[in-house]
Image (cartoon, rainbow, N blue to C red):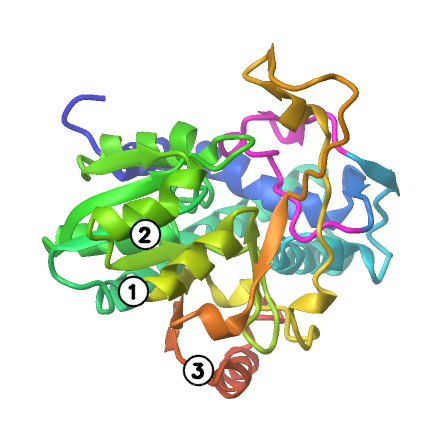
Amino acid sequence: MPGRSCSETQAARASSKGAAFHQASALLAEESGRWHQPAFQEGTAAAPPFSGQGPGSHLTGHRRTPAPERRTSGAYSRDSAKAPRKRLPSLTEAGRRSQGMIRHRPAEAGLDLPQTDAELEKLAVKVYEQDIAKNKKMGEYGAEVVPEEAVILTHCNAGALATCGWGTALGVIRSAHEQGKVKMVYSDETRPLLQGSRLTAWELLEDNIPVTTITDNMAAWSMKTKGINIVITGADRIAANGDTANKIGTYGVALAAKAHGIPFYIAAPASTFDFSLKNGTQIPIEERNANEVRSFQGKVSAPKNVNVFNPAFDVTPAKLIAGIITEYGVLRPPFSKSIKELKTKVLREELFTWKA
């Protein structure tokens, strides 16, 4: 939309109470068990709620139509103690919030179904607004580590399309751009689903932030020849020692950054941390359909019977990470210490009890 940024467009769409509800209620429904969505198979690091598509792309009214085919292992039960851990930690926390409201408040307050829906809508809007506020705070802290004349490389999509608005990694980039710090952003296309070229590049163009898209195997050479001086990515799950799971290819980017002396940063809210995991070896990794690799945009690109290894995520060791940008500030090594301090702050503020 000419003269209107991606983030502004998002905000305009969200100004409607119903629009905010549709987007945020998807997060609540994922974990509440109200519609008993199928769980991802054992081995899911972080299952994207919309399978890499835009927020709410499978929403119709308050319910969701079936998403594209996923590997599953039976129906998800809201009473399962283990099922929520297979999903994004942020979804788990939103689910706890909605479960508490669904299970207790209607009975206590004598609410009927329409009233319960209204309460859920209020909760969804609150979660939606809090998510954007956290992203904005993350952007403020993150912009402080971005150098002047920054040439930034990012991987996958961690922007307004991956959150309720503003974004995590792209939120940092947006905030830095507002301060006049961003010279260029290099966006990895992110094979095999091309979130970087389809989503990240589009978001940055909409916000008039200079962006150049590269294929994943060009990242190291771009670091050497294009003056890249900082890398910022999002995260899907972070262990207690700082090991970080993110979209496949992130580990390779971190290794290349280390080899070139370029600081590698993660941007993620506190809800991404899984304090129960000691290190990244305990993060299970989803393996996706082989045809995502055997074909490209509907065209056959490999022999149909060739073996394929298609992990959706990889784990970047904490030793490769310069800092983790959160809504509480930038965590620095040793991460075991700084993440422990973060956990104390989170528990103190009762963010994980989700009192609405």
Please tell me which residue lies in front, 154 or 327. 154
Which dot marks residue 38? Answer: none
Q: Position of residue 2 (x, y in %)?
A: 17, 22
Q: Is residue 195 visible?
A: yes
Nearer to us: label 1 or label 3: 3
Mark found first going from the N terminus, 1 or 2: 1
Magenta residues, start to end: 43-70
Return the residue nearer the eye: 285 or 107. 285
Check disc 2 and report the residue beneath it.
171
Provide residue 109's location: percent of width, then percent of height.
70, 57
Q: Image check: 19 left or right of 213?
A: right
| Residue at which label 1 appears | 142
Ranked by sequence position, the earlier of labels 1 and 3 is: 1
Q: Quadrant of residue 157?
A: top left
Q: Quadrant of residue 214?
A: top left
| Chief SS of the magenta region | loop
Q: Is 336 left, or right, of 171 in this rendering?
A: right
